[in-house]
Amino acid sequence: MKLKTNVDADTGKQDLVITREFELPLELLFKAYEDPEIVEQWMGTKVLKLENKNHGSYQFETTAPKGDMVLKMNGVIHEFSPNKRITRTFEMENAQFGVQLEFLEFEKLTDDTSKLTMHVIYKSGAQRDQVLQLPFTQGINMAHNRLQDIVSKLK
């Protein structure tokens, strides 16, 4: 089965580009990144903070079924332009991957379809390659599939 989210990572580079076309109007795709309740549903994580503004910040936390904290993610939102772009940092606490810089671009294709392009930059090519050794591509596809399913019910 072909994955709907594409991850392009050129050899020897320290960045990657993630693209996905959604069967969602632009405003609903953007809302999936803006609304804490929707973010929690498709990411499967708790939103502790989400300040959708220039120089805002966010913090997410994922717990195991017994309530043990498994993963904390946080970052700074450098640019927040509704229905256009989000520029932010992303960091997983207590992980070896370090901080990454993410440029999220939202594009209207038709009244009912839109595209997300994420340009992600890592500190080094080695760090990026470590991330790609994980089931990263499958994970982002699963998350985007959930996003599509959950947000399409809001139409």
Image: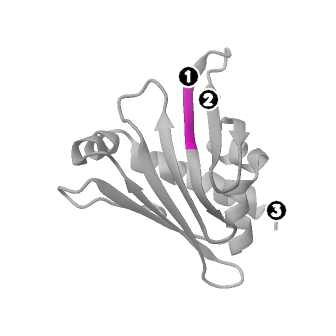
Within-10-Å neighbours for mark 2: few <14, some 14–19, many 20+: some
How far is mark 1 from mark 2, CA to CA?
Answer: 6 Å
**Residue contact between numbered discs 1 and 2, judged by CB atoms under 8 Å:** yes
Q: Is residue 9 left or right of residue 52?
A: left
Looking at this view, name the residue that lies furthest to the front.
55
Kindly identify which residue carries mark 3.
154
Quarter-wise, where is residue 72 in the image?
top right
Which label number is shown at residue 62?
2
Q: Secondary structure at mark 1?
A: strand
Which label number is shown at residue 70?
1
Image quadrant holding the N terminus, namely: bottom left
Type of the residue with mark 2: Thr
Of discs 3 and 2, which sits in the foreground?
2
Q: Which residues are magenta?
A: 70-75
Res. 145 visible in picture: yes
Looking at this view, name the residue that lies furthest to the left.
12
- Residue 21, position as x, y percentages in the image: 55, 71
Of discs 3 and 1, which sits in the foreground?
1
Mark 1 and mark 2 lie on one chain; the one further toward the N terminus is 2
